[in-house]
Image: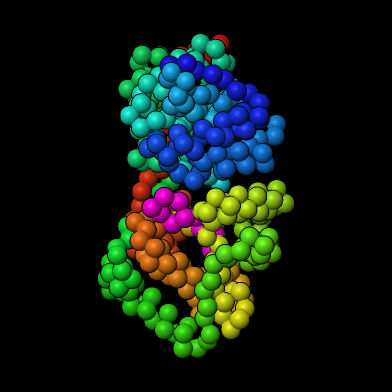
Amino acid sequence: MRVELYTEKEAFLLLREEWNRLLVGSPSDTIFLTWEWQSLWWQFFGRGHQLLLLTARHEEELVGIAPLFYADEDMTLRLVGGTEISDYLDIIALSGQEREVWSAFLAYLLEKCSWDTLDLHNLPAASPTREVLFSLKEKYGLKVEASREDVCPLISLPGTWEGYLQMLDKKQRHELRRKLRKAQREAQVDWYLVSEEANLASEMEEFLDLHQRSSPHKDQFMDQTMQRFFKAVAKSTFEAGWLRLGFILINGLKIAALLCFDYGDSILLYNSGYDPERYRALSPGVLATAHCIEEAIQQKKKVFDFLRGNEEYKYRFGAQDTEVYHLVVTRARSR
């Protein structure tokens, strides 16, 4: 297995044709590891950092990608995608070859790169990485520590909306039905998805406005750089067919919005926004989420993923926790 190192941003362009083909054949297939997401994250947030992107090839076939970079801390390597806006991260390895790929990457890193810590955030519970690194630690003289970093609540979707309602406990089922009936009785409620690229830029402006108005925390989060990143991600994922940007209209006014991704067999609810002043009594956030879940069921999706965070509303919709892990790998001595 041959390992190659790339340290310049042009590496993303060089690997574009192969990247996603490998990803769909790996156990780590998620939108946050796609070429589109990773290259955009580096474009907007990689400035001031040193890229350390490793590839592994077996007889010229790409079988592994480790998108790493030197973090602000001295001699610390992290995964491209950061810790805040990419909910799932990992290396990318061809299914069945995870141990061989990790072994090749570790051997290369230990022999040819200067680092003290490999700081791996947002590893999904199903990722082979934890098991593989623990199995290799003695061979390479490493210390590996794992801890639960967060949870990602998700719903395993049934085949029908009524079947979904029956999954909820009696109280939550009653509350959801009551809120849906109340909204339909007291106002004209509509839900729609953005479907034309020509309107995407203006629709994203409206989404960002609702997002920033939702709370002081969201307003602070959505600075100018983050706004540009969100717009670029929306354009790129729309072109790939993954974007699901939906709005709830109440009496013709956009009151709530959800920015979701349709990837594989899942709908991922990435971010949201709502008007905190108008029609609060009609629970526009609940309406938007319910419509999105119902649409996912109609599309025969298997999972509705709320992504990271244990906000109470997710559990009222029947979500169950999956875990996300943080691994810290330290070498015996630095070079």
Question: Residue 289, position in %: x, y?
Answer: 46, 67
Q: Quadrant of the C terminus?
A: top right
Please tell me whether residue 24 is drawn above or below residue 167 in the rendered image: above
Quick one: 16 or 176, which is closer to the camera? 16
Q: Which residues are magenta?
A: 258-267
Q: Main secondary structure of the magenta part?
A: strand
Please tell me whether residue 283 is drawn above or below residue 137 in the rendered image: below
Count the marks. 0
**In this rendering, position of residue 208 left or right of residue 171:** right
Question: Residue 210, position in %: x, y?
Answer: 63, 66
Question: Residue 131, position in %: x, y?
Answer: 33, 29
Q: Residue at x 35, y 61 (%)?
A: 300
| Residue 266 within the segment the image draws in magenta | yes
| Residue 262 within the segment the image draws in magenta | yes
Please tell me whether residue 241 is drawn above or below residue 277 in the rendered image: above
Question: Residue 236, position in %: x, y?
Answer: 60, 49
